[in-house]
Amino acid sequence: MGLLLAADRVLTPEELLEPGWVEVDGTTIKAIGSGRPRREPDWSTTTLVPGLVDTHVHGGGGASFSTTSADEAALAALVHQRAGTTSIVASLVSAPVSVLADQLACLADLCDDGLLAGLHLEGPWLSPTHRGAHDIRHLARGNAQAVERLAEAARGHLRMATVAPEIPGGFEVIKALVDADVLVAVGHTAADTPTTQEAIAAGARIATHLYNGMPPLHHRFPGPVGVLLGEPSVTVELIADGVHVAPATLALTARAATGRLSLVSDAMSACGLPDGRYVLGSTPVTVTDGVARVTSSGALAGSTRTLAHGIRTLYAAGLPLVDAVTAATATPARALGLWRRGRLVVGAAADLVALDDDLTVTRVMVAGAWR
Ligand SMILES: [Zn+2]
C-alpha cells in the first residue's frame, strides 16, 4: 500500500481537484483522484502542486553551479530543492570553453545521481552589447567544434544553450546544437527581426528570460521580444522576481504566451542569503535590498529568489493560480523534454510541493521522500 496524501485542492496542474488525493508508491505516483480518498490519508494539507521545475538557475546559498566542486554544486541544488524546486536545470555563465567543459563534466555526475535534471549553457555565444552580467572577456564567436566538445563533456545532460544568432558563427552554433539534440534558446542578443525569425526557422525554441538581455519591443522593429513572443513554437522564459519584469508586463506576457510561459528564477549564489558582495562566474556582484547588480556597471545580475517566490509574484500580478503553477511546472518540463516531471499524473516522478494559503512552501517531496 502506497503513501496516501490528501489536500483541499490538488493542482495537477492541468486539473484542479477540490479536494483531491495522490497516492505515492516508491519514487512514482501510483494513483490520483478527486474527492475524499477511500481510506484515511497518511498526511493532509491545504494545497498540493507538482514539484517545481526551474530551467534557468545559477546557484544559491552562497554556492554556484559555475564550479568544478561537486560539493558546491550540490549545496546550491539543495537550497533550491528545500524551497520546492525538485527539477533543477543548472545554468552556466560564460567562461573559456575548457573551463565550461570541466564544469559540465562535474555537473553531469550530479545529473547521473538525479540531483540535477539537466544542464544549460548560457553563453559563451552572446552579444557583447547585451551581455548583462556575463564577463565580456569570455564571450566567444560561434564554432561547431566548441559545441561538440561541450556536449561531449556533459555526457548527454546538456539540454539547452543560449545563443545570440547575430554574432559571427551564431548560425553555425545553432546548427551544431540542433544536430547534438540540444535545445536552442535565443537570448543576450541584439538580433534584428529577420535574424530572430531565421533563428526560429533554424530550430530555436526557447526565449532566454524575455525582455532581459535584449532590446525592448518597438512597434516598427519587433526584434527578439516581438518575434519570440509572437511565435507559437517558442517557450518564453520570464524572470518573475518582480524586479526584472514589472508586474503589469508579466500579466501582459502571460496573456500573449498562453501555455508557453516558463517561469525561471535565474537565481545566483546570493539566493537565500543577506545583502552583500558576491560573484557570478567571474563578475563581482553587489546585492542591495535583495536585488543583485554587477558592481561595476549596475546591470541586473540574476535574482536572489527561488521559483516558488515567482509563483507568488505571478499570482499577485493577477494570474489565476493554475496558470502561475503551470508556468513553474508543466510548461518548463514539457519544453525541456523532462517527461516525468512537472505534472501530477500516474507514472510521473513523485515530486510534490505543499503550499499554505499564502502560497508559501511548507513541505517538499522528492522522488517519494520528504525533504
Ligand atoms: Zn542571463
Image (spheres, helix red, strand yellow):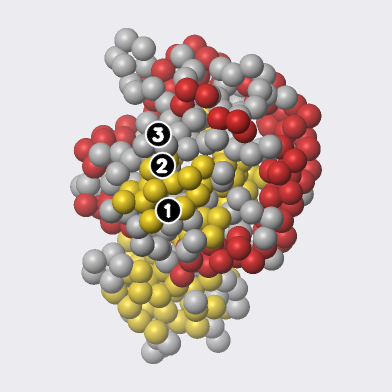
Circle 3 sits in a helix, a strand or a loop, which is it? loop
Label 1, label 2: how many angstroms apart (C-alpha)?
9 Å
Cα distance in 3D space between marks 2 and 3: 6 Å
Name the one closer to the observer, 27 or 156: 156
Identify the residue position indicated by label 2 in the image: 295
Position of residue 283 relative to residue 45, above or below, is above
Residue drawn 47% across and 38% down? 133
The N terminus sits in image quarter: bottom right
Whether residue 154 is situated above or below residue 354 in the rendered picture: above
- Residue 160 appears anywhere in the view: no
Q: Which mark is residue 192?
A: none
Mark 2: amino acid: Thr
Residue hosting label 1: 277
Q: Are marks 1 and 2 in contact (CB under 8 Å)?
A: yes
Dividing the picture into quarters, in which one does residue 124 lie?
A: top right
Q: Nearer the viewer, residue 305 or 234?
A: 305
Few, some or many residues within 10 Å of mark 1 (<14, 14–19, 20+):
some
